[in-house]
Image (cartoon, helix red, strand yellow):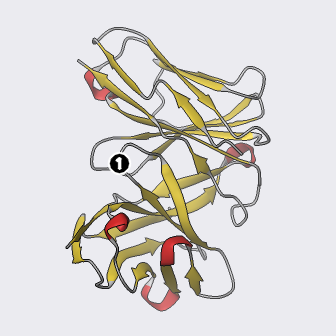
């Protein structure tokens, strides 16, 4: 169990640029989540994958955001035409169990995005 | 809708003193509740969770929390604070979402400072 990894850990970009983040979940985990954490707030749910299928998206995920998990392993989160309001920590989590009582989501270290 | 409220965005204690971090939940059904800890520049780590059964839940690093339905609370405690406990703590509730996933809804967090 090497844990959830995310790359890059930090990203600084200019407004209007596109950015892509990668998440590698724990190898046997079929469930993958993305959350966003802004300064002074708790993480907020963005989207959920079961294997390669994206099954739930939050209203926070505007049209400029797209997430994929092409082979049911790693996932990418792309933000197009970044805005200063996109500055946040983007967290990935993975898990195996289905029932809420059983599920433990294991979080990666996050990618901190700063849009100038 | 299920939600959690954390009272006190900053808590400061002396090393060796009792730690008490407050969390109240709002739920129409019995909730499944979690406490996560986030150290600087790291992802979230699960401290403990309450699902069913015993209302006093023991977690890692000497932390425990008690589920009190009558008070709709799930406060986190530790008898004796250590410098290494300095971190941000998040209370969360989990809920099933479309597609069989489970979404965590977090409070706004409590920053714990431990002083000599």
Q: Which residue is drawn at 54% across and 54% down?
A: B104
* In the rendered image, the vertical position of residue A40 relative to residue A22, given as above or below: below
- Badge 1: residue crowd in 10 Å (few <14, some 14–19, many ≥20): few
Query: Where B103 falls versus A15 (above or below)?
Result: below
Residue ranking furthest to the front: B116
- In-front residue for pair B54/A48: B54
- Percent coordinates x, y for residue A116 in the rendering: 23, 17
Q: In which quarter of the image is the C terminus of chain B?
A: bottom left
- A46 on left or right of A42: right
Q: Give percent across and percent down for residue B113.
A: 24, 66
Q: Which type of secondary structure does the marked residue at label 1 adopt?
A: loop
Q: Residue at x 49, y 56 (%)?
A: B105
Q: Locate residue B93 relative to residue B14 in the image: left or right.
A: right
- Residue at mark 1: B40
The residue lying furthest to the bottom in this view is B70
Q: Toward the viewer: B63 or A76?
A: B63
Residue A23 image point, x, y percent: 59, 29
Residue at 70%, 58% in the rendered image: A103
Identify whether A94 is placed above or below B76.
Answer: above
- The image quadrant of residue A49 is top right
Relative image position of residue A1 (x, y in whole percent):
72, 46
């Amino acid at each position: 169990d090497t844990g959830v990894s995310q790359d890059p850990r930090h990203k600084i970009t200019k407004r209007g640029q596109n950015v892509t983040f990668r998440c590698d979940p724990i190898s046997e985990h079929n469930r993958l989540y993305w959350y966003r954490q802004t300064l002074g707030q708790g993480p907020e749910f963005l989207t959920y994958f079961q294997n390669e299928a994206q099954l739930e998206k939050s209203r926070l995920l505007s049209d400029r955001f797209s997430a994929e998990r092409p082979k049911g392993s790693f996932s990418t989160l792309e933000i197009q035409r970044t805005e200063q309001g996109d500055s946040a920590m983007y967290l990935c989590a993975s898990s195996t169990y289905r029932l809420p009582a059983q599920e433990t989501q294991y979080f990666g270290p996050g990618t901190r995005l700063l849009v100038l | 809708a299920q939600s959690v409220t954390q009272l006190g965005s900053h808590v400061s204690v002396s090393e060796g003193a009792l730690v008490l971090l407050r969390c109240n939940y709002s739920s129409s059904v019995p909730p499944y509740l979690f406490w996560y800890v986030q150290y600087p520049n790291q992802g979230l780590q699960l401290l403990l969770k309450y699902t069913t059964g015993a209302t006093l839940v023991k977690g890692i690093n000497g932390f425990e929390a008690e589920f009190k339905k009558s008070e709709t609370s799930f406060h986190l405690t530790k008898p004796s604070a250590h410098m290494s406990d300095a971190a941000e703590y998040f209370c969360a509730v989990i809920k099933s979402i479309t597609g069989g996933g489970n979404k965590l809804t977090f409070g706004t967090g409590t920053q714990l400072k431990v002083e000599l």
